[in-house]
Amino acid sequence: MSAINDRIRSVSVGVARITLVPLLIRTGVFVTALAAFALAYPVRILFDRPGLLLLVAAVLPAVAPRRRWPTVAVLVAVAGWLLSTSWYGEPVALWRLLGLATLLYLTHTLAALAALLPYDAVVSPDVPTRWLLRALGVTLAGAVLSVLLISFTESGADRAGLIAALAGLGVAVLVAALLGWLFRRR
């Protein structure tokens, strides 16, 4: 009985020491995982018994980001996407696919940040802000490249047009990187 009381006491002391930024980051892990499940699964599954399991699957990576739970959450969302598009016959919509990819990447990267920060860490608000801006930049670049490639493959455009578009995108990225380097150098 003493071991249980000691464990309860240590959990209550830990909860009392939680600071705002790590709590917000873990909340972000939960929200992005839950939103990914909402995009991946059909609506009729979300509000049935499996919806409670999905809620637990969204809580676990937020509570224990150092374990395998973020990977499990991503795999559960991918399984939901495959289930809804193949078994339930829902159409594949580009906005839904890009939204799911963005949410899964944000879940993964926020879980990585949460795994680095103890519950009681004192963190400047600039740290998660810069982390999220970098992650949103990655997802935006991935979405632009995906839409560009899909539009060229669906329109039947020639290979030279695709190469020119990709080269232009590469030049734009290089110019942005050069400008960022110049501003940081100051």
Image (cartoon, rainbow, N blue to C red):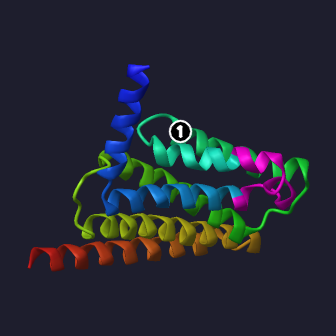
Q: Is residue 7 left or right of residue 153?
A: left
Mark 1 Cα shell of 10 Å, populated few (<14), some (14-19), many (≥20): some
| Location of mark 1 (residue) | 69
Which element is circle 1 on?
helix
Query: Which residue of the protein is positioned furthest toward the front in this rendering?
Result: 1
Residue at 44%, 55% (x, y): give it: 26
Residue at 79%, 45% (x, y): give it: 50
Which of the 4 quarters of the picture holds residue 122?
bottom left
Q: Amino acid at mark 1?
A: Trp
Q: Is residue 119 left or right of residue 29?
A: left
Q: Quadrant of the N terminus?
A: top left
- Magenta segment: does it hold 46? yes
Highlighted magenta segment, given as a residue range: 38-53
The answer to whether one can see residue 78 in this image is no
Q: Relative to 26, does residue 133 appear above or below in the rendering?
A: below
Measured from the top left, where is residue 178 in percent x and y? 24, 75
Residue at 37%, 66% (x, y): give it: 134
Q: Which of 141 and 65 lies nearest the eye of the viewer?
A: 65
Q: Which of 50 and 3 lies nearest the eye of the viewer?
A: 3
Q: Quadrant of the C terminus?
A: bottom left
Residue at 77%, 67% (x, y): give it: 93
Q: Is residue 178 left or right of residue 93?
A: left
- Total marks in image: 1
Measured from the top left, where is residue 166 in percent x and y? 50, 70
Measured from the top left, where is residue 111 in percent x and y? 44, 49
Which of the 4 quarters of the picture holds residue 146?
bottom right
Q: Relative to 96, does residue 74 appear above or below in the rendering?
A: above
- Magenta segment: does it hold 29? no
